[in-house]
Amino acid sequence: MTVAAGLGYALIALGPAFSLFAGVVARKPFLVLTLLSSTLFWLMSLIVLSGIWRGFLPIKSGTWWAYAILIITSVALQEGTRLVFWRLYKKMEEMLDAFADRISKPRLSLTDKMLISFAGGLGHGVAHAVFFCLSLLTPAFGRATFYVERCSKMPFFLASALIALGFLVIHTFSMIIAFNAYDEKKKCDQIVVPVVHLAAAVMMLVNLAPGGCLIGTPLLLVMAVLTLQYCWRVACRRLTEHQHRQLNN
Amino acid sequence: MADAAATVSGDPRGRPTVLDSLGEDITRIVYPVSACMLLVVLLVSLLSSPSAPSPLAVSIAAATGGGGGSGGGDDIPTALVTALTFVVAVTAATFLLALLFYLRCTPCLRAYLGFSALSVLLVLGGQVALLLLSRLRLPLDAVSFALLLPNAAGALALAALAPASVPIALHQAALVAIAVLTAFWFTLLPEWTTWALLVAMAIYDLAAVLLPGGPLRVLLQLAIERNEEIPALVYEARPVDPRHGRNWRLWREGRQPGADLDVSSTTVEVIGEVFGRNLDSNSGNSSSPQVHGVATSAGDANNSRPRATLAAALSSADSTIAQAEEVPVLREHRVAVAEMSVPLIQPRPERSGEEEEDEDGIGLSSSGAIKLGLGDFIFYSVLVGRAAMYDYMTVYACYLAIIAGLGITLLLLAFFRTALPALPVSITLGVVFYVLTRTLLEEFVVQCSTNLLMF
């Protein structure tokens, strides 16, 4: 529905990501590189996933359990990618600390580590939004709009933009929680992240029912807000602990 | 909590850590490459009619080595012959350039450089401008156009060729403009020809830079021996620091007062030193003097300007293209492109004499500047532009692949510290990702998205 609508949908999906990028990530070039590499990782995991599932597509529309298996395998693979990303990040952190020691500058502070995990999560979220929403948005710049049968109350583009926004928030902030959990070796947080991801993805199965997208999309946004709030709690707790430790030393 | 909030907001009272400036030179190359690709994608979307979204059969045929030709008179043998002809012509031109450089015929090289830059901007730029005017229905009369175009072309050509007399931003913008125009014209080639050309140029690049008899390597050695720079169009990622508002031309002087600007060691050197240290500490030698020694001696030997820039110039336009009727414009921009194809990337660590202890603990203030040939810009953008003709999903995938390839090349550069070809890794990754996206990813994503199932 014209350029304005197309741009509107693109901004719904990626507007917060853009302001996060401009405000936080663009200031430190290393974070830009982290974002690009985590986007690449997400893309590679998606390609592997589509390679695995290529033989089974197109799935017949009645079989919702096939979609459930697809979602579960996808989430499992992506959580595996997150672990791999964590290992690479640890190696990078060692190299950076070694370099910082050599040039006698301070090592990576806690804020730096959180910023790196934030950039990594934002990369995953941006990759999700770009590949699932933005790449299909081209017809929205034309003259008409598009409705999916099962979702006759919302234009398809609006639904996919809102879902992309929800997942962007979830990916970004769950990466911070996850890296924190791996760092502090907190089992409960380590479990929370995949569970939240899986729950959000499984919630999308609601969209398969006729009219389901009116329930699924707001629920997803609620999950996103919950993730955001949990991440805020984790980050505040960690930072205040760090402050206290520094004051005591 | 106020302190925590202050720490969270990155209060400058906290000591600046390594993270503040690391990776800056890489992003200063990534931004212009991305801008060039973005402009080409925009031009392609506005001006070209998209190629028919081929059914999967064509992609499967591609994956299995190609059967008979696909429709439209664009078949694989023709494509291969065209690509081969182009590579042969570029090789011949590079050898000719090496010969001219050996004979110290610099004025004619410079004249040719100016002629090609001006012709790209005037002819190709004019035609693109006309296409844009007609497509966007902008009102502009012929007289104004005839006044504006030569002036703009002349100014940009001058900015591209004489970087010492214009602000750096204008110089870099002019180079990007030349690359965008040339890349856009390459995307007008038929599909198979474009892909064959990209792969052929990647292989040529690899051979020309790394093989001992390769023309680019010969040229490079000549330039290093004589300590001269080859006249060519090369994008140099000079740090442009708008925050300080200094005279940007300061950087051209060759020595920068270290206290003025935020000088920190470049990422390339960082990676090189870290790798060097890890390797050396494994082998039990002392790392730092060795790495410094190598770098400083290289810097001193080349008089702190070890720049080696390469170009392949086509001396005569008597290109023997059998398929002249196929692409009439091929002749005129072959001239320009062959001139511009500088598939080379090289660091230029520049060490000034003074030691600035306060800048960074290494003890040498240095501003390495990564140079990327304009030919790399062009071929990256051609790949992404051709991907844009299919669908935007391939654009995003190929963009990420190319940036990843560029990153890998820079890592290799830091590791080997010699001139490296920038095309092969990126083009390979780009082509692989294009094929994978088109065959595997698109179906999957469309299936999931239209059912509003995302994860």
Image: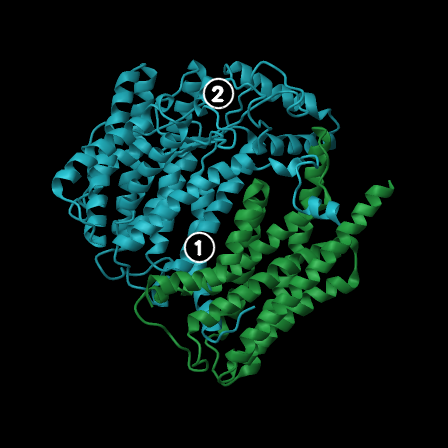
Counting from the top left corner in percent of width and height, residue B400 is at 48, 50
Name which of mark 2 and mark 1 comes first in the sequence: 2
Q: Residue at x 67, y 22 (%)?
A: B358
Kind of residue sitting beneath label 2: Pro
Give the residue furthest to the right. Answer: A248
Tell me which chain the residue with mark 1 is part of: B
Kind of residue sitting beneath label 1: Tyr
Q: Residue at x 69, y 51 (%)?
A: A87
How far apart marks 2 and 1 lie (CA) works out to 36 Å
Residue B306: give its label.
2
Looking at the rendered image, the quarter that the C terminus of chain B falls into is bottom right
Counting from the top left corner in percent of width and height, residue B176 is at 36, 37
Counting from the top left corner in percent of width and height, residue B327 is at 20, 47
Picture quadrant of residue A31? top right
| Horizontal relation, residue B309 to residue A64: left or right | left
Q: Colour of chain B?
A: cyan
Counting from the top left corner in percent of width and height, residue A69 is at 59, 76
Q: Report if residue B429 is visible in the image.
A: no
